[in-house]
Amino acid sequence: MSVPTDAEECTYCGSDLSFCEPVFVAETADGEHVPAGGFCNYACLSAHIEQAELVYGASCTVEP
Ligand SMILES: [Zn+2]
């Protein structure tokens, strides 16, 4: 059923970005730029960033 495609999928919701004007972003992790993927709209981008910040926030509070 699945047909291989060059189309990107939204990193957050998995929508086909070929239907949209995708937003591609890169994040910075440990001083390195990391491709964070593409998003079908800014709502998905915002939601993804919120989740990512939650993860980063948790990882920044490491007890010795
Ligand atoms: Zn999306």
Image (cartoon, rainbow, N blue to C red):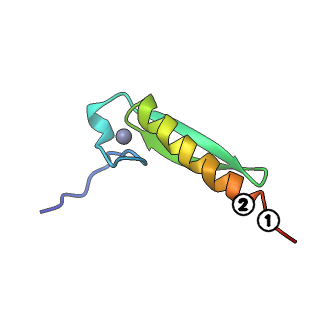
Q: Which of 60 and 16 is in front in this view?
A: 60
Does the CB distance between marks 2 and 1 fall below 8 Å?
yes
Is 11 located above or below residue 39 in the figure? below
Name which residue type carries label 1. Answer: Val
Is residue 28 shown left or right of residue 54? right
Report the Cα–Cα distance between label 2 and label 1. Answer: 6 Å
Residue shown at the point (56%, 42%) measured from the top left: 50
Is 16 located above or below residue 64 in the figure? above
Q: Where does residue 11 sit, x and y in percent of width and height?
A: 43, 48
Q: Residue furthest left?
A: 1
Residue picked out by circle 1: 62
Disc 1 residue: CB within 8 Å of ligand 1: no
Name which residue type carries label 2. Answer: Ser
Instruction: Find residue 49 and name its label.
Output: none
- Circle 2 packing at 10 Å, graded few (<14), some (14-19), many (20+), is few
Q: In which quarter of the image is residue 30?
A: bottom right
Q: Which secondary structure, mark 1? A: loop
Is 40 located above or below residue 5 in the figure? above
